[in-house]
Image: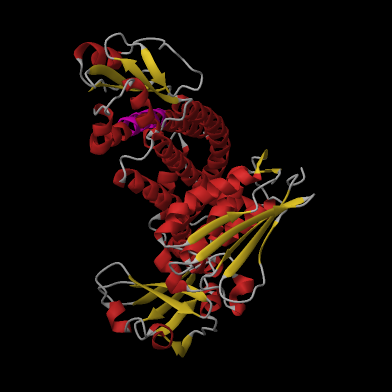
Amino acid sequence: MLRSLHIKLVLIMILLVVCLMAIAGAFLINSVNRFYLNEFYTQMVEVFSEDTEFVRDLVTAREGEQDGGEAIDQILLAKMGPLGVDGKNRNYYILDGETAEILASSDDDGAQTLEKLTPNLLIALNEKREGNESDLTANYMDLALPIQRGGQDYIIYILDQRATVRELNSQLFQLIIEALAFGLIISVLLSFLLSRAMVTPIRALTRGAQRVAEGDFDHKIQVESHDEIGVLTNAFNAMAGQLQSTLQAVDSERTKLSTLFLHMTDGVVAFNQSGEVIHANPAAEEMLDMEIPLGGTVTYQDLFGEIAPLETILTLERDCLESETVRGERTLLFLLAPFDREKQVGVLVVVHDVTQQVKNETMRKEFVANVSHELRTPITNIRSYAETLEENPDLPPEMTGDFLKVILNESDRMTHIVQDLLTLSRFDSGYSQLNLTRFPFAAVLEDSYQAVRIEAQRHGHQLLLEGTEGLPNVRGDRERILQVIMNILSNAIKYTPDGGRIVMSAGADRERVWLEVADNGIGIPDGDRERIFERFYRVDKARSRESGGTGLGLSIAQEIIRQHEGSLSLVERSGPGTTLRMELKREGPKG
C-alpha cells in the first residue's frame, strides 16, 4: 500500500517537472528568437522609415560627389549606434545595385564578399524593393534596402549573425538541463517525504476512527479499500458521528492557529464587536512598540481609531481597508477587515512592516534619477554638435568629420556611463574590474575638452586647457577616467553663471599626473564641502533638480578614482568658485 502511493507520487512529480521544464524551455527559446528578430526589424524601421532626414541624406547626392558608396558609408558610420552595428556580430554593407559588389563595409575583418546572397538581398537586387522577410529558423537576421543616389543604384545591406541569440539560447538550454536534473532529484526526494507524511497520518487516523466508532480505541476497523485514500475515506465516514473526534480536531486547529499567530512575523490584533482586544501576537506589540493586554485596557479606538471607526470596519463591503502610517522609525501597513460581515463578530488587523520596501523604493527612484543625470551630458553634447552641423551645412569636411567623430564618441560614452553606474554596486561589494591600458593622459584631456567646448560656449563660458605639453602616458581605465573628467567639467559648466571662466590645468611629476578644474561659479559653502562626495547629497537641491543632478555623480567619480588608487578632492581657495583636483599614479593601481 505504501509502495503503490510512493510510485504514484514519484511518477507524478517526475512527469510534472519534465513537462514544465520542456514547455518553459521551448517557450523561452522561441520567445528569445522572436524578441531579437522583432527587435532587429523594429530598430531598422525606426532608423530607415521614421528618420526622414537620415533617409533623405542617403538618397541625395552632394554636388560634385565622385563616390556615392563612400558618401553612403560616411552617413551610415554616423548611424552605427541607432543601427546597432558593432563591426563584429552586426555589420552594414554597401553594395552595387546591379552587380552586388561590396563597395564599403563596417566589417572589422575587412570582408570583401558575402558568403551567400540571402533571399532579402535577392529581393532588393532583382525586384528593387526592400527585403525585410524574417525567418526564425535562419542563423542570421538581415535587411536589404535598395536606394538610388546620383543616378546610381545601391543596396544597403544590414547583416546580423545572431551570435547573441545563439549564445543566450545555449545558456538557456544549459540552464534548463541543469534545472531539470535538479528538479528530478528534488521530485524524488519530495515523493519520499510526501509518502511518509501522508501515509503515517492516514494510518493513525484509521486506528483512531475505529476506536471512536466502536467505543474501543484499541480496536481497528476493517480496511476495505485497496489503497490509502480508500482507507482514509472509510475512517472519516465512521468518525463523522463522533463528537469526541470533532472536539479533538477543533482543539488541534486552535493550537495550530495559536502557534501560527505566536511565531508569525506579521503583527495580528483581533478585536470583538465592542472593540476589546481578544488576541495580539508579539510581532504586533513589537511593531507598535507597546504592550497590548487582553480585555478593555487597550481598545480598538486607542490603537487604530485614527484610521477608521470600528463600525466602519465591521460593515466594510470590500475585502479589507489598507492604511500606511509612519510610527517612529518604522513604516507600517495596516490591513483591517471584519471577521464576518453579516454577523459583525469582530475586526482583525494585520500589521506589515514595510520600512525596507519603502527604503528600496526610494533607492530605486534615486537610481533612476541618477541615470537620467549621468546620461544628460553626452546627450547634450551630441545635440550641440548635431545642431551645429544642421545650422552650418557648409562646414569644411574636416570639421564635419571631427564633429561626427565627437558625436560617435559621445554615443559610445552613454553606453559606458550606464555600465559604470551599475558597477557602483560592485565597488561596494569589493568586486570590480578595471580595463587597464596605457594611454596618453593629454589625449584624454583633449577629448574631454572638445566634448564640452560647445556646451561651454553656449553658456558664454571661457574654457581653457593648460599644461598638456609633455604629459606622460598613464596606466588606467581610460573610459572611466574620461567619465570622471567629464563629470567634473559638466558640474563646472552647470554651476557657473553664464559668461564664466573654467580652466583645466594639468601637470605631472615622476610618480603622478594631475588635473585641476577651476571655475569662478557659485562655489560650495564651507558647511557642505565635506559632504559633496556622499551619495545622493546635493548642496542646492532646487538647483540640482533644475539641472538634472541627483548628487551621485561625484560619489561615482570618487569611487572610480579610488579604484585607481588616486585621489579626488576639493582644493582650498579664496574668492568665489570651486577647484577640484584629480591625481592618478602614472603606473596605475597595483595588481
Percent x, y of residue 167: 50, 27
Q: Does the magenta stretch include residue 380?
A: no
Image-quadrant location for residue 543: bottom left
164 to the left or right of 57: right
Identify which residue, 332 or 31, lies in the foreground.
Answer: 31
- Residue at x 30% of width, y 40% of height: 393
105 w.r.t. 364: above or below: above
Percent x, y of residue 46: 28, 37
Main secondary structure type of the part rendered in magenta: helix
- Residue at x 32% of width, y 69% of height: 320
Image-quadrant location for residue 93: top left
Identify which residue, 377 or 293, lies in the foreground.
Answer: 377
Task: Provide the residue span drawn in magenta.
Answer: 26-41
Specify whether residue 19 is in view.
yes
389 w.r.t. 536: above or below: above
21 w.r.t. 320: above or below: above
Percent x, y of residue 3: 54, 31
Identify which residue, 488 or 472, lies in the foreground.
Answer: 472
- Residue at x 50% of width, y 48% of height: 450
Identify which residue, 449 or 126, lies in the foreground.
Answer: 449
160 w.r.t. 306: above or below: above
Image-quadrant location for residue 189: top right
365 to the left or right of 579: left
How many numbered marks have been drawn onto this rendered protein structure? 0
Percent x, y of residue 127: 19, 13
